[in-house]
Image (spheres, helix red, strand yellow):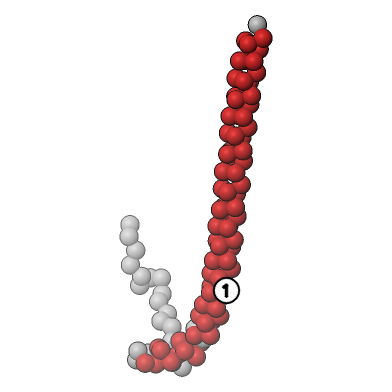
Amino acid sequence: MAKRKKDNSKIFITLSFAVLGFLVFCYVFQVSQMAQASYEIGQKQTQLETSRKEVAGLEASLLQNNTLEKYEQKLNEMGYQKIDRIDYVVVSSAVVASRR
């Protein structure tokens, strides 16, 4: 009977250490994964901030490059001319063709 209690206590201690070792392993693995995720989040936030600054710079550049004067200059280069006078054609309703 005493030998059986010793065997049971050895099994209990062995299983206790095995479970404890498994729990320690899980904890270390979890901490490692959290550290890696935290590092990746920091990198992504840095990339996001860099992208936001780049977009703001591009928007400012676009606003500077697309002024009305530049459009007028481009239209002149393409051969368009500024309109000085507009004449409208007056059409009476009796002359207009209609579908019946």
| Residue that carries the numbered disc 1 in the rendered image | 53
Closest to the observer, 3 or 75: 3
Q: Where is residue 1 in the image (x, y as percent from the top left)?
A: 65, 6
Q: Classify residue 41 by image quadrant.
A: bottom right
Q: Classify residue 53 by image quadrant.
A: bottom right
Q: Position of residue 91 (x, y in %)?
A: 40, 76
Q: In this view, does 81 lie above or below 29?
A: below
Let me know if residue 85 appears in the view: no
Q: In this view, does 74 lie above or below 95?
A: below
Closest to the observer, 35 or 25: 25
Using a 10 Å C-alpha cutoff, classify the residue at mark 1 as few (fewer than 14 neighbours), some (14 to 19) or many (20 or more).
few
Residue at image position (33%, 67%) is: 97
The answer to whether 3 appears left or right of 63 in the picture is: right
Q: In this view, does 91 lie above or below 18?
A: below
- Name the secondary structure under disc 1: helix
In this rendering, the count of numbered labels is 1
Q: As shown in the figure, which amino acid type bears the numbered disc 1?
A: Lys
